[in-house]
Image (spheres, helix red, strand yellow):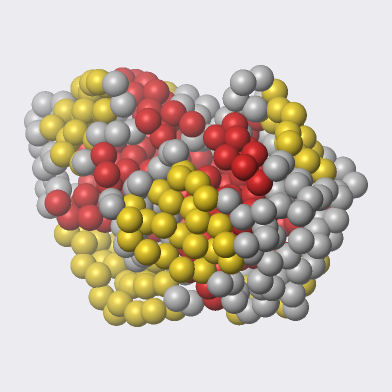
Amino acid sequence: MHPDHPQPLRAQKALPLKGSAAVPGDKSISQRALILGALAEGETRITGLLESGDVHSTAGALRGFGAELTQAAPGQWRVKGTGVGNWQNPKAALDFGNSGTGSRLVMGAMATTPITAVFTGDASLRSRPMARVVEPLLAFGVRYEGQGSKALMPLTLHGAKDAAAIQTTVAVASAQVKSALLLAALNAKGASRISQGTLTRDHTEKMLSAFGAKISVQPSGAGEEIILEGRVPLQGTAVEVPRDPSSAAFPMVAALIVPGSEISLPAILLNPRRTGLIDTLLEMGARIDITNRRISGGEEIGDLTVRHSELHGVEVPAERAPSMIDEYPILSVAAAFARGKTVMRGLEELRVKESDRLDAIARGLEQNGVAFEIENDDLIVNRTGSNGVPGGGRVSTHMDHRIAMSFLTMGLASRQPVTVDDVAMIATSFPEYRDLMAGLGAVMEAP
């Protein structure tokens, strides 16, 4: 991916979508499996790992700390870790490409190890604020030099020696910030207590337990308190990565808005803190059947059947945002085809994603004739007349994979084709996207 060599793509109105969509492994769990494997003693064997640009960037950075990571076959990896607190000084800057999750979690993982590392990435990642992660890590005694008040990359992080446990409350509803603090607490002396006022993704907590960490979680008001005992060795284990609900969102919404469609999505992660989009679509009248619910690797998964549906607008409360923060771009597309008004509240976190996603969504809707309003951090989408979404726009993706895939989805059901200015970055999370969608019957081609 390079901004000087964009790859535009156009999606046009599709015939009914049919078939099975085997989306890739979950990115959040893939990233955490590699990082905890690199911190553990012994060998971790991972199956179903997402083979994407983001995950490969994180793997490369972990090798810089002395962990051994090898690919046995597509999706099957072996990680030989160093043990907690035993990472080495990298010999070169760590290039995380477009991986915000990987870079922020690794900052936490090295924060209580007395080494120094330089973090950098592509143009998009270098524009994303890192202060929201490194400032909370100061409680452990770390030091850093970043670019400006937002601590942009390139950023130099100096880990703390003999760090002590902390007691803190996460100021933002961010699983990345919470996870960075938990990973830092692994090598701090004593029991750290990390509280959050809003429930966020809990993949890190579940996986820490699977690796042998001494961790407990207890309710606290609308949130919870997590207690983690530091300097307890992690042991390598087997990790099976379920399929990513964030990637499943694109064929799912496509099937809902393209008349006559019916598709299946096997083995999708159904962690309750990741199903906000499914819950919202069901409220909107979506025909989504979930069968064969089961537990795999400590996480609930299930098989989905999705059929074309007549959607109607709903109000999405702010407290649901953490369970679907990556899905608001595609939800805005579903809302454009729904009867009435859809109100999405509390979207401030979208402003610090791969792009200012709230603004990128608004501009994409505008380019394609969809009526909307933004009130502070709320997005309100109104159906545009009875003839459906006009389409015909060319959308600026701002190097954001979810913006690209969302508006390509719109083009499959709008009156006129929709073009996005670049799709190269889709490989960061969903390298199989174009082939998978073509297999369902979607038509996407260079403009």
Q: Is residue 93 left or right of residue 286?
A: right
Please identify the quarter of the rendering in which residue 153 is found. top right
Please identify the quarter of the rendering in which residue 95 is found. top right
Picture residue at 44% right of the left edge, 38% below the top: 171
Please identify the quarter of the rendering in which residue 219 is found. bottom left
Residue 83 in the image, given as x and y percentages of width and height? 76, 69
Q: Is residue 192 left or right of residue 251?
A: right
Residue 378 in the image, given as x and y percentages of width and height? 26, 28
Image height check: is 196 above or below 360? below
Picture residue at 33% right of the left edge, 56% below the top: 220
Picture residue at 33% right of the left edge, 72% below the top: 302
For the N terminus, the image quarter is top right
Q: Please give the count of numbered marks on the rendered protein.
A: 0
Q: Is residue 120 visible?
A: yes
Q: Nearer the viewer, residue 422 or 349?
A: 349
Image height check: is 173 above or below 365? below
Q: Nearer the viewer, residue 187 or 444?
A: 187
Q: Nearer the viewer, residue 435 or 356?
A: 356
Picture residue at 16% right of the left edge, 39% below the top: 315
Image height check: is 7 above or below 366? below
Q: Nearer the viewer, residue 273 or 246?
A: 273
Q: Is residue 262 left or right of residue 138?
A: left
Residue 44 in the image, given as x and y percentages of width and height? 68, 75
Q: Is residue 74 left or right of residue 227?
A: right
